[in-house]
Amino acid sequence: MVRGCSILGAVVFVLVLLAAAYGYNRAGQTGIVAALVAGLACGGPALLALVVTVWFAGGPNAVAGTLGGTLLRTGGPLVGLVLSRALSPELEDAGLVMMVLGIYLGVLPTETILAVKLSNAASAAAKSKSMSKQQAADEMNV
């Protein structure tokens, strides 16, 4: 889990650096601030989505975990865009919408691949744990 979060954080970091370069060329320091806001709006929810999805994987609430992760992953950038537009139109002029879209589209496949890999591992661990409990119960009944 820690490795997956680290990989996702590294991807967000690289994407924010690219967005900051774009923003600086477009609007100077305001563009760098817009890149940081875009990184927070996309990176934070993606990290939370990964944790929620993996946390609920393999249990009876796996579908709820997946849906919760999807809500976090998509809702965070959307709320960030709405709030930033209302609170700071300068960020929108600096290219915040394009930065959010670029970072989101880079983070989405990364988070999805990591969630699938980590969820499969969590499901396998939960399955082997339940199998070992069943074997222990069978041995006690014999």
Image (tube, helix red, strand yellow):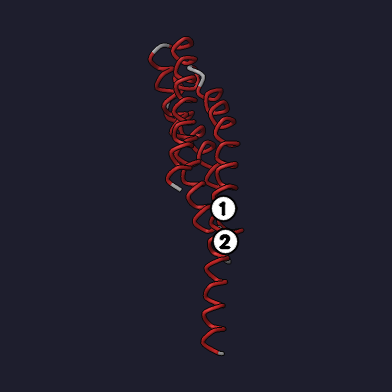
Q: Nearer the viewer, residue 96 or 116?
A: 116
Identified at 42% across, 45% down, the residue is 2
Q: Where does residue 133 sit, x and y in percent of width and height?
A: 52, 75
Amino acid type indicated by mark 2: Gly
**Quadrant assignment for the C terminus:** bottom right
Label 1: state its secondary structure. helix
**Label 2, label 1: how many angstroms apart (C-alpha)?**
7 Å
Disc with the residue nearer the chain's start (2 vs 1): 2
In this view, 132 is above or below 23: below
Residue count near mark 2 (Cα–Cα under 10 Å), binned few <14, some 14–19, many ≥20: some
Q: Nearer the viewer, residue 72 or 126?
A: 126
139 in relation to 103, above or below: below
Q: Identify the image quadrant of residue 39.
A: top left
Circle 2 residue = 58
Q: Which mark is residue 45?
A: none
Residue type, mark 1 in image: Ser
Tag count in the figure? 2
Q: Residue pushed farthest top?
A: 25
Mark 2 residue element: loop
Q: Residue 23 location in percent, x, y? A: 47, 16
Residue at image location 41% in from the left, 19% down from the top? 32
- Residue 65, by quadrant, is bottom right
Q: Are marks 2 and 1 in contact (CB under 8 Å)?
A: yes
Tell me if residue 107 comes above or below residue 34 in the rendering: below
Q: Which residue is mark 1?
A: 119
Q: Looking at the picture, how far across and down is residue 18, in whole percent?
A: 49, 19
* Label 1 CA crowd tier, 10 Å (few <14, some 14–19, many 20+): many
